[in-house]
Amino acid sequence: MEKERHVLVVFPHPDDESFGVSGTIASHVNMGTPVTYACLTLGEMGRNMGNPPFATRETLPAIRTHELKEAVRVIGISDLRMLGYRDKTVEFEDPDKLTKQISEMIDELNPSLIISFYPGYSVHPDHEATGEAVVRAVGMLPEAKRPKLECIAFSNNTIEELGQPDIVHDISAVADTKLDAIRAHRSQTELMVAEMAVKLKEKDPQTLAWLNIERFWTYKF
Amino acid sequence: MDPVIVETVQEALDRFQNKEVYIHLETTNGAYASHKDEAFFSSGAYIRNAKVVYERAKITGNGPFRTGLKIPFGWVYAEGITHFEIDSKERLLLAGHDFQGKLAVALEISETPFE
């Protein structure tokens, strides 16, 4: 993994930073690279309320804010910015507003690497709208001045259309940090983590790969 | 939240009768339903802070429950309600959780706007 000047991570939901990417972020942190995480929403529309329920639609944002701060602390992200959008509404907002916010962060932070979702291949409408805004903001810069843009893609047509990821990180050295980050989002991940722990104990190859290998596609303008 | 107690919920519904109230109404199957199962037709609806006055309201069924509010020119209703809470702001929160504890439907009533 190359040493970066500054890494800017842009995702819409608390926990997007923990699945599939927290090992990479933690590795950058360990190299002494400052990381800024712009998290657009508080995941207000999360569906896991527990059984019996420990959260309501109205208490969930506060719970998820707390979880987000804990995950950010675990990963070692120094700069968390909560942008105040509402879960599942990002695609309905004025796209120029979000693009401008991202452009301003790029101006301010001068990142050498941006991590976000790959538009068209990231399943959730908030993921798509976030990735689109990041692509617009980066695309507005002259080609020579653009930071690298490495994207997460996981829709079912990803490999067929984008091909294999061009960036593959083995993050097993920081796998425990990643697991702790995922665990920090307890309201969303408790059931999943319990299942995962069993599979990890059995050394299930698929679960180990899911945990230890993080994959990105460099955005092609 | 607690499993629905019909009498308690009905009393709470009656307290808001003929008052200007804010409604949160939501149905959801989750944003990943069609990703996990391409044969699944994903749908949902959401309205937050609609201001209504209702003339009658009723919770009914054998559980999961149905709740309907009769408003001057129409209706508001939700089905699949399993749990309720009257929170510290005196708001009535109704929700339907599926077998894994995931929220599938919510109907909430408050005299002040939801944040």
Image (cartoon, coloured by chain):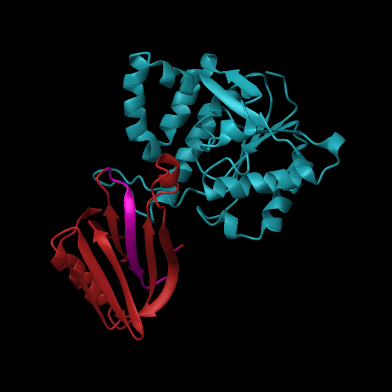
Chain colours: A cyan, B red
User: Is A165 on the left-hand or right-hand side of B91?
Assistant: right
Count of picture labels:
0
Location of residue B74 (image quadrant): bottom left
Percent x, y for residue A24? 59, 24
User: Is A92 on the left-hand or right-hand side of B2?
Assistant: right
Q: Which of A91 and A58 lies nearest the eye of the viewer?
A: A91
Q: Residue at x 51, y 37 (%)?
A: A156
Location of residue B110 (image quadrant): bottom left
- Compared to residue A62, the image places residue A93 above or below, namely below
Percent x, y for residue A27? 61, 21
- Compared to residue B51, the image places residue B27 above or below, namely above
Magenta stretch encompasses residue A60: no
User: Is A203 on the left-hand or right-hand side of A5?
Assistant: left
| Residue B113 visible at all | no
Q: Residue at x 74, y 46 (%)?
A: A137
Percent x, y for residue A143? 84, 37
| Residue A193 visible at all | yes
Q: Quadrant of the C terminus of chain A?
A: top right
User: Is A189 on the left-hand or right-hand side of A157?
Assistant: left
Percent x, y for residue A112? 76, 31
Magenta stretch encompasses residue B110: yes
Q: Which residues are magenta?
A: B100-114
Q: Quadrant of the N terminus of chain A?
A: top right
Q: Residue at x 67, y 53 (%)?
A: A98
